[in-house]
Image: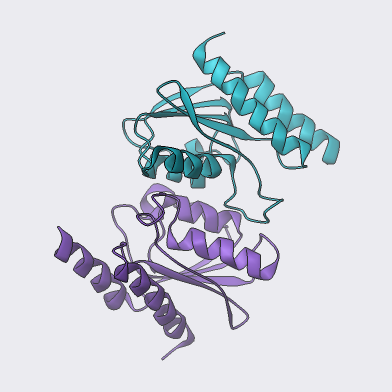
Chain colours: A cyan, B purple
Amino acid sequence: MTDDERYMQLALHEAMKANEIGEIPIGCVIVSRGQIVGRGHNLTESLQDVTAHAEIQAITAAASTLGGKYLTDCTLYVTMEPCVMCAGAIGWAQIRRLVYGAADTKKGYRVYAPQALHPKCQVVSGVMEDECKELVQTFFKIRR
Amino acid sequence: MTDDERYMQLALHEAMKANEIGEIPIGCVIVSRGQIVGRGHNLTESLQDVTAHAEIQAITAAASTLGGKYLTDCTLYVTMEPCVMCAGAIGWAQIRRLVYGAADTKKGYRVYAPQALHPKCQVVSGVMEDECKELVQTFFKIRR
């Protein structure tokens, strides 16, 4: 198992926490120099707040842990391709590495805001893609 | 003075609160059926959190006031054109009317994510543009 897969598995654990409380199961961890500095999972229903995406929670947590708002040294792992809002936040935080699991062809940033990330941000996609995708697909299959 | 100007003036008051504490002076109010349901001003430095933009604070506040995450009936007034992140949040909240003061040609959503808002969102720009722009320009003139 690669480091990216190991951290994505932790992001999947976050996603499962969302799943358990009836939230669309998306999870995120932020890693700085081998340490988890922020975690988050989708809480939009629980908080009744559209801004409560996994990435936003994790970015706020990481900035608090590190004591600064720029997360230049960090890698953000998220189970699903970030939306426009989250890509904008990842850009503002100057995160230089983004790793996501499943693509989001409907609401993903690549369609709506392909330039939202920092120009030096390296993007890796498809890490544990099947597990990330299946979790969300199962969630919707049960509910819709 | 039109209703839009009156509410933009309240957004400007929010921006001045940011100014007083050394934050880039951007302010926001959200109005539902003639009532202010959310306010916010930029707090990115105070909170050391890139997600603490005026619009994000105001959206969270409005959802809390109204008891629901969709702000379909609301107009969001903000002194500066929203960034990608905030436009994404405005889109998720399904806000149907956005009024902003000054354009942001560098970081505004119209360049980076022109489709981020709800497709039915009406956009009005340039309301009290000079006052909104001057506040930010003066902020940077003093500091840089």
In the displayed structure, would residue B131 be above or below residue B96?
below
Q: Does residue B71 appear in this view?
A: no
Instruction: Point out residue A24 in the picture as x, y percentages from the top left corner.
Output: 71, 40
In the drawing, does residue B94 fall left or right of residue B84?
Answer: right
Q: Where, by quadrant of the figure, is residue A80 drawn?
A: top right
Instruction: Point out residue A115 in the picture as x, y percentages from the top left corner.
Output: 38, 39
In the displayed structure, would residue A35 be above or below residue B144?
above
Instruction: Point out residue A85 in the picture as x, y percentages from the top left corner.
Output: 50, 47
In the drawing, does residue B90 fall left or right of residue B111?
Answer: right
Q: Does residue A47 appear in this view?
A: yes
Quadrant the N terminus of chain B occupies: bottom left
Q: State the residue at coordinates (64%, 70%).
A: B65
In the displayed structure, would residue B73 be above or below residue A105?
below
Q: Where, by quadrant of the figure, is residue A132 drawn?
A: top right
Q: State the residue at coordinates (82%, 34%).
A: A141
User: In the image shown, does A22 or A63 lie closer to the viewer?
Assistant: A63
Q: Where, by quadrant of the figure, is residue B28 drawn?
A: bottom left
Q: State the residue at coordinates (66%, 59%).
A: B69
Q: State the residue at coordinates (34%, 79%).
A: B128
Instruction: Point out residue B112 in the picture as x, y percentages from the top left corner.
Output: 39, 47
The outermost residue toward the bottom is B1
User: In the image shown, does A59 or B102 lie closer to the viewer?
Assistant: A59
User: In the image shown, does B81 or B59 lie closer to the viewer?
Assistant: B59
Quadrant the C terminus of chain B occupies: bottom left
In the displayed structure, would residue A4 be above or below residue A1?
below
Q: Total label count? A: 0
In the drawing, does residue A39 fall left or right of residue B69?
Answer: left
